[in-house]
Image (tube, grey):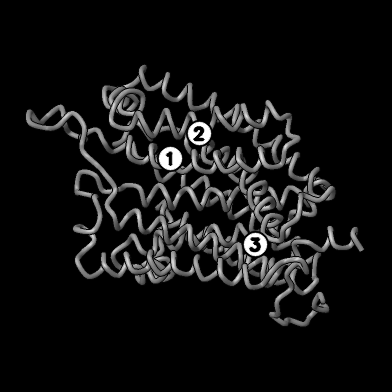
Amino acid sequence: MCPAEGNVVLTPLQHPKMRPQKTNLLLAFMAALILIGVGAGIYAQMIGHHHAFANTREMPWGMLIGAYAYFAIISTGLCIMAALTHLVHIRRLEPLVNRMVWMSIIMIFSAFFIIGLEIENPWRMPLGVLLHPNFFSNIWWMGTLYGLAVSFMIVEFFLIFTGKTHAAFILGILAVVTEVCANSNLGAVFASLNARPFWYGAQLPVFFLACAFLSGAAAVILFTHLAHVLQGQKISEEMRPGIRYAARVMMIMLFLIGLATLWKYANSYCGTEEMVKSADALLHGPLAMTFWVFEVGVGLVAPFLLAGVTRLRSMKALSLAALMVLVGQFFSRYNLVVAGLLVPQFGQYCIDAPYYLSYTPTISENLFIVGSIGVVGFGFLFGERFFGHLFWKNNASSEG
């Protein structure tokens, strides 16, 4: 039974056909993944982050920074999709909105999980943001804005839960404005570093926003399909138009991001020696496998062809294409971070400097990724278990 307005009772409101035993088993598995990630974080604190991670003074960032950006960008995409649904009255997406809001919250929590375990003194981060603000720092603005955004979204979801839809709409607008600003600041963290020519320039903030649209559309498709699989049903007729609409957005953004990727690397060969070396690292160097196979093949070409060949009619094909997009976007963030740092910064002044620095993620770093996947999985299942009625109410009303 849906809670009346103003009353908050956290009781299971899942779809009536969902099996609690199956959900609880999956929740336990995801909780185990989270504990694995937390255990890796405790291990890193005990032996020192400089021993647990593959980062060095010359290579200060690695896979974990890319993973943080990955989850944060997906959160932005879901938030944008949810807000646009109400702003421009996209009726086909309306049955999917509440799940978008919930998963946007979960994605930013996963990003915070990564960054909280990655930094050596995580408790200093919120204190620094509040007590020592630096208004000229992109990182300060990024952290502050993402913190505000997730606060707005939590209140928005609470208002949705209590039936106060008008107030929830206002909070949703505040959330999407702060998310977009945070996303552009995330891009500016890289784009403003003129010491790293591969990142420097005005493209990345816009590119990250485009990736948010792509990742958000893919996440909508994937999690909607997984919710139906979880309760053993085919995609309902009420949900199909929304999924196809998200698939069209996904295909458009695949084309645009593919074009932007092409021009980025073509332009790199017109730049400095460091830009050429970074592009070489991706095209036929140490990152060629992750670039050609995962970022381009799995993440751009294959899902575009799969969705196009099936003409957006097969829900399983669209879900697989969405999964491939999300996998490809992870490697896109990884490649972006690592390629920008692989070239020694002052290599031209040092005779014995290597052509490329070496970086291979350690076991601890990989376990952090496992933990972040656990956060996403646990959050998704928890939402279906306790807030499922909010996600299925349009479908349920039509069936009734």
- Whole-percent x, y for residue 163 in the image: 80, 71
Q: Is residue 239 above or below residue 346?
A: below
If you read the primary sequence from the N terminus, does the residue marked by circle 3 or circle 1 appear first?
3
- Whole-percent x, y for residue 235 in the image: 77, 49
- Determine the CA span between mark 3 and mark 1: 25 Å
Secondary structure state at the residue bearing disc 2: helix
Instruction: State the residue at coordinates (59%, 33%).
Output: 303
Amino acid on which disc 3 is placed:
Trp
Residue toward you, 60 or 389: 389
Mark 3 — residue?
102
Residue 87 shows up from this direction: no
If you read the primary sequence from the N terminus, does the residue marked by circle 3 or circle 2 appear first?
3
Instruction: State the residue at coordinates (42%, 19%).
Output: 266
Left or right, 24 with respect to 244, comes to left
Amino acid on which disc 2 is placed:
Val
Amino acid on which disc 1 is placed:
Phe
Q: Is residue 193 above or below residue 65?
A: above
Quarter of the image holding residue 307? top right
Secondary structure state at the residue bearing disc 3: helix
Q: Which mark is residue 298?
A: 2
Secondary structure state at the residue bearing disc 1: helix
| Foreground label between 1 and 2 | 2
Residue toward you, 225 or 192: 225
Quarter of the image holding residue 314? top right
Residue 400 shows up from this direction: yes
Quick one: quadrant of the N terminus?
bottom right
Mark 1 — residue?
331
Task: State yes or no: discs 3 and 1 in contact (Cβ < 8 Å).
Answer: no
Task: State yes or no: discs 1 and 2 in contact (Cβ < 8 Å).
Answer: yes
For the residue carrying disc 1, how many other residues have a C-alpha within 10 Å: few (<14), some (14-19), or many (20+)? many
Q: Is residue 34 above or below residue 138?
A: below
- Whole-percent x, y for residue 362 in the image: 27, 52
